[in-house]
């Protein structure tokens, strides 16, 4: 099979405790291989959305929010003990980071997952490589403050505080090069400037359990859109890997498509939608370039998960699939709603996909069956 992406096999060596080993395989795609026991395996994913590390990085307030965000992730990971984590975009607020190497903040955001030995994958949001925005307060007394370039406890020397920012490609390369547990990839070069476009097949008991697709929905240095080229790439790859649509498919990107507006609840969240907050309008991508038409025609596509809107956490049916928001996880970014994480659980036998919200305080709500 001819394909444009690299390969990596992740092998579960045991289930309790969770251990992972990254090895090179013979296939041309990444694969997550679940253990052969127990036969009724449950594959659980925690989704961290809109962490916004580095927000107001030149102040004392900003680093405090990063510490708070670390606390949220740690609480979710300890309560749910997921097998996998998805970082669903806006990992950092690059437009607030006065440092060339914003990957230092990116690395800090990954640390709660990495320290627990849990593998993860990332997808880009609109803030992750946004150009630095000069704060208006810098032009009033007392003027420009001392720059807090390094992340606390990092080895950064403090050089090159140039406001240049860090590109998507640099951020992803740094993550891939320095983290054996990262399954993130840069994706095919033909899709650039979109970077985080790749697929992770999940195998259980020698069969494909689910395909996880990641798409870069733009923003930051280029328009907020899943392009027509990305849509064609998804169609081609999904038909190659899953020609008869027998394997369920789940999609992750950051900015909701315009289809989310069509199903959005008005005021309260009512059936068949499930969720707890509906506090703003859907901030959709700038244009629809065909990806939703492709998704609704594939019976194997079960759900799309997005972030971006901090005041929304609902799931609503759309045609034969579900459109879901994650829960705002980070203390950076707008809004004072309680923080949490959307959890996605995939059961092997009998097959089912369910989801719920796990809050920072340990409570859970909004459980929904997606397949």
Image (spheres, helix red, strand yellow):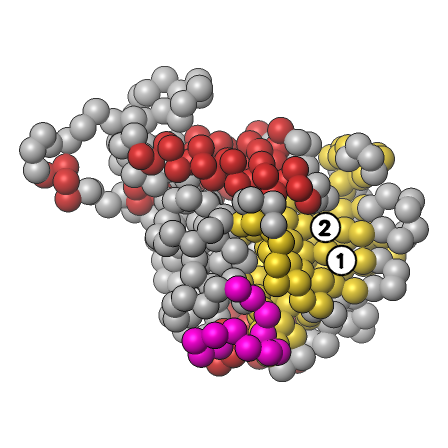
At 42% across and 70% down in the image, what residue appears?
A: 282
Judged left or right of residue 40, residue 70 is left
Q: Is residue 275 magenta?
A: yes
Across and down, in percent, residue 151 comes to: 40, 26
Is residue 156 depicted above or below 27 in this figure?
above
Q: Is residue 120 visible?
A: no
Q: CA distance from mark 1 to mark 2?
A: 6 Å
Nearer-the-camera pick, 210 or 80? 80
- Give the quadrant of residue 117: top right
Residue at label 2? Answer: 44
Q: Is residue 113 above or below residue 346?
A: above
- Decide which of tag 1 and tag 2 comes sooner along the chain: 2
Magenta region: 264-276
> Residue 197 location, x and y as percent?
57, 55
Identify the residue under disc 1.
Answer: 346
Q: Which mark is residue 303?
A: none
To which quarter of the image does residue 355 belong? bottom right
Q: Is residue 126 magenta?
A: no
**Above-or-below relation of 217 to 144:** below
Secondary structure mostly taken by the magenta-highlighted segment of the chain: loop
Which percent across, then down, holds residue 220?
36, 53
| SS under mark 1 | strand
Label 2 Cα neighbours within 10 Å, binned few <14 / some 14-19 / many ≥20: many
């Amino acid at each position: 099979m001819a394909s444009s992406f690299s390969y990596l096999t992740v092998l579960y060596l045991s289930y309790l405790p969770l251990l992972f080993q990254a090895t090179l395989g013979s296939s041309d795609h990444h694969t997550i291989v679940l253990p052969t026991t127990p036969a009724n395996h449950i594959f659980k994913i925690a989704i961290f959305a809109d962490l916004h590390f580095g927000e107001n990085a030149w102040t004392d307030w900003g680093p405090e929010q990063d510490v708070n965000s670390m606390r949220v992730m740690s609480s979710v990971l300890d309560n749910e003990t997921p097998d996998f984590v998805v970082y669903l975009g806006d990992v950092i607020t690059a437009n607030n980071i006065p440092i060339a190497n914003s990957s230092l903040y990116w690395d800090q955001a990954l640390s709660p997952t990495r320290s627990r030995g849990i593998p993860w994958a990332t997808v880009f949001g609109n803030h992750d490589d946004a150009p630095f925005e000069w704060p208006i307060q810098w032009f009033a007394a007392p003027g420009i403050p001392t720059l807090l370039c390094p992340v606390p406890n990092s080895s950064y020397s403090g050089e090159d505080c140039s406001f240049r920012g860090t590109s998507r490609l640099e951020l992803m390369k740094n993550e891939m090069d320095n983290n054996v547990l990262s399954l993130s990839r840069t994706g095919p070069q033909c899709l650039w400037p979109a970077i985080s476009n790749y697929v992770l097949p999940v195998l259980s008991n020698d069969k494909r359990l689910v395909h996880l697709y990641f798409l870069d929905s733009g923003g930051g240095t280029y328009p907020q859109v899943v392009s027509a080229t990305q849509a064609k790439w998804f169609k081609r790859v999904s038909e190659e890997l899953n020609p008869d649509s027998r394997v369920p498919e789940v999609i992750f990107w950051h900015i909701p498509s315009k289809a989310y507006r069509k199903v959005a609840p008005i005021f309260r969240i009512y059936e068949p939608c499930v969720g707890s907050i509906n506090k703003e309008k859907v901030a959709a991508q700038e244009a629809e370039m065909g990806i939703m038409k492709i998704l609704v025609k594939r019976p194997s596509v079960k759900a799309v998960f997005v972030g971006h809107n901090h005041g929304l956490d609902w799931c609503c049916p759309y045609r034969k699939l579900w459109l879901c928001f994650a829960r705002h996880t980070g203390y950076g970014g707008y809004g004072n709603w309680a923080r949490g994480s959307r959890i996605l659980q995939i059961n092997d036998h009998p097959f089912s996909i369910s989801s719920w919200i796990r809050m920072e305080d340990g409570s859970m709500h909004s459980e929904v069956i997606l397949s």
